[in-house]
Amino acid sequence: MKKIFFTFLFLASLPVYSQSFDRFQYEEAWSFSVSAGATQYFGELYSFWKYNEGIQPEWNANIAAHYTFGTHLRARADFSYIKMSGQDPPSDPRANRIPRNLHFRAKNWEVTAMLEYYWSPVKVPNIHRSSWNPYIFAGVGMSTNNPKAQLDGRWVDLRPLKLENNPYNRNVVVFPMGLGLKYKLNVYMDLTLEGNYRFTMTDYLDDISAYNISEFYLDLVDDYVTGNNPDRLRLAVRNPNFLDDNGLPDVDKILRNGGRIRRGSGLKHRYDGYMTVNLGVEIYLAPDIWDNFFFRNRVNEKAFRFW
């Protein structure tokens, strides 16, 4: 009789065991991630590679959706808020940028689509994911572009002012690429560390491109003298050597100089870029995740707990 009773209990418990382990045996194609970290801009106001510049970090936040479609391949869509800035005063003296006294900041929104390639297979059941998995990625996207500079205690949009008489778009194409590393925290979640550099198709993330203002200084001076738009000259020329005692542009000095006042690097084929280094988490969308991960099935948990 006892044998029959225990045999019945064993057979009755099999579906529970099976259900508990079965939920780990499926490949979860979809996941989403959230991350945040530091942003470093590269352009006319920062040149880490050539001079001893230190860093001028800002911050960013990101959310992304991932889809596994190959043994080592995943597709990814990102949405990011990215803050960046740059300024002359802390630059390396050898760069000869300090006298310009220029600066900018920007708060941009970015959307990208990317392809990820992983060292270890990713098209595997959740329980078999590698504990550590490095990967590379690349893609294409769009970012807003609205640099600002401070004048008289207020932040002014630079793009509408066309300081160099050269209009540029509010949205720019970006090409993200970089390296990442994932660490498996549990069946449903990974910890992620990622470095992502964006190449862009613009030299105006910082509103600076021309080497000096010689080609358009007369237009700037005219707008200043007539009062049509005096902010243009004030924002284009901030070098103390060309300002009067009140901190305003010295028109006579600028005219006598012929507009040969340093502004950018003068490189015609150099585009700006920026890099983010983020730490985040990725959650795999298993069918039972809400029941077993966030809210946990209390009935099964009392009998069998696997985490």
Image (cartoon, grey):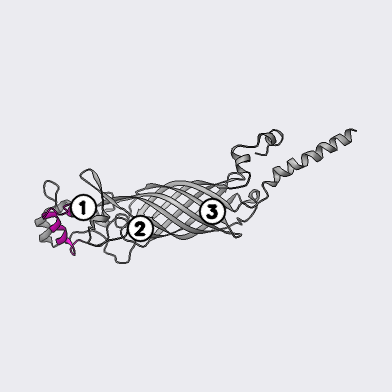
Image x and y of residue 183, in percent: 56, 48
Q: CA distance from mark 2 to mark 3?
A: 25 Å
Mark earlier in primary sequence (1, 3): 3
Along the line of sight, the residue nearer the viewer: 86 or 295: 295
Q: How many neighbours does mark 2 have within 10 angstroms: few (below 14), some (14-19), or many (20 or more)? A: some
Image x and y of residue 31, in percent: 56, 50
Q: CA distance from mark 2 to mark 1?
A: 22 Å
Along the line of sight, the residue nearer the viewer: 227 or 140: 227
Vertical relation: 298 (above or below) 259: above
- Secondary structure of residue under mark 1: helix
The residue lying at 70 percent from left, 42 percent from top is 20
Label number found at residue 66:
3
Vertical relation: 268 (above or below) 62: below
Q: Which residue is mark 2?
A: 171
Residue numbers of the magenta segment: 212-237
The amino acid type, in three-letter code, at marker 3 is: His
Mark earlier in primary sequence (2, 1): 2
Image x and y of residue 298, in percent: 66, 34
Q: CA distance from mark 1 to mark 3?
A: 43 Å
The residue lying at 60 percent from left, 41 percent from top is 290
Q: How many neighbours does mark 3 have within 10 angstroms: few (below 14), some (14-19), or many (20 or more)? A: many
Numbered disc in front, either 1 or 3: 3
Mark earlier in primary sequence (2, 3): 3
**Is 237 situated left or right of 285 in this image?**
left
Q: Which residue is mark 1?
A: 235
- Secondary structure of residue under mark 2: strand
Q: Is residue 19 magenta?
A: no
